[in-house]
Image (tube, rainbow, N blue to C red):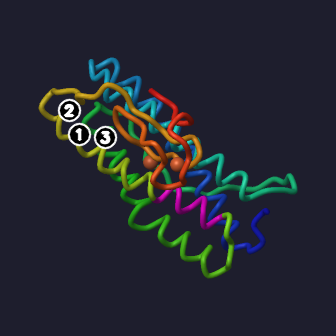
């Protein structure tokens, strides 16, 4: 069911905008990483871009109908730099979501009894915690000129949960089955 309260609805719009920006900038930064020879960091950016798309889609669904025009105001990190600096932008963006944005949005949705928005915000919050950590690890390596030592990145298509090398039997955040995970 679509969101009822304006405040939570505003936050869904803003979160949608933020996730969309993150999706795009990670695809761009993936290309930069590829060019610099960081094949696996490029893969990480592409995979996490997909996770942010999952979040955007979840928020979009919770906004629901009717169809209307809406001006979205959303914060987003900008910068077209080298991979070490791009990763700093990624870390900053993820930490903003983990420490500021999603806890506040989640609290508002809880206060307003918006169950669907709560789920959508919680899914994003849990994934962004993992993303912040992964980007930090990648940056530590990139600073030494090293790439990530991974085989693959797996993303849960329901909540965006992100894990290296093997999907879990059941998503720890949303319970989705292993077979559903998308491999990058
Ligand atoms: Fe993220
Ligand atoms: Fe999940």
Q: In which quarter of the image is residue 63?
A: bottom right
Residue at the extreme bottom of the image, as rendered: 111
Residue 53 within the magenta-colored segment of the rendering? no
Residue at 33% from the left image edge and 49% from the top image edge: 91
Residue 142's disc is 2
x and y percentages locating residue 130 in the rendered image: 36, 50
User: Which residue is more in the foreground, 73 or 155?
Assistant: 155
Q: How crowded is mark 2: few (under 14 residues within 10 Å), some or many (20 or more)?
A: some
Q: What stretch is highlighted in magenta?
A: 117-125
Residue at 48% from the left image edge and 55% from the top image edge: 173
Of the residues under marks 1 and 3, which one precedes in the sequence?
3
Residue assigned mark 1: 139
Secondary element at tag 2: helix
Residue 124 within the magenta-colored segment of the rendering? yes
Q: Does the residue labelled 3 lie within 8 Å of ligand 1?
A: no
Instruction: Please report contact status of discs 1 and 2: CB closer than 8 Å, yes or no.
Output: yes
Classified by dominant secondary structure, the portion drawn in magenta counts as: helix
């Amino acid at each position: 069911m679509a969101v009822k309260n304006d405040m939570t609805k505003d936050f869904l719009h803003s979160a949608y905008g933020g996730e969309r920006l993150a999706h795009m900038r990670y695809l761009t930064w993936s290309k930069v990483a590829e060019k610099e020879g960081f094949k696996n960091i490029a893969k990480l950016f592409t995979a996490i871009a997909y996770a942010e798309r999952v979040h955007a889609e979840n928020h979009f669904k919770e906004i629901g109908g009717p169809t209307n025009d809406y001006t979205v105001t959303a914060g987003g990190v900008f910068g077209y730099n080298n991979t070490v600096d791009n990763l700093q932008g990624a870390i900053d963006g993820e930490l903003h979501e983990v420490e500021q944005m999603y806890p506040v949005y989640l609290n508002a949705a809880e206060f307003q009894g918006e169950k669907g928005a709560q789920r959508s915000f919680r899914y994003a919050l849990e994934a962004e915690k993992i993303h912040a950590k992964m980007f930090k690890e990648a940056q530590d390596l990139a600073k030494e000129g090293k790439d990530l030592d991974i085989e693959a990145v797996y993303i849960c298509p329901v909540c965006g949960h992100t894990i290296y090398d093997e999907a879990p039997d059941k998503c720890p955040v949303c319970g989705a089955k292993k077979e559903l995970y998308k491999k990058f």
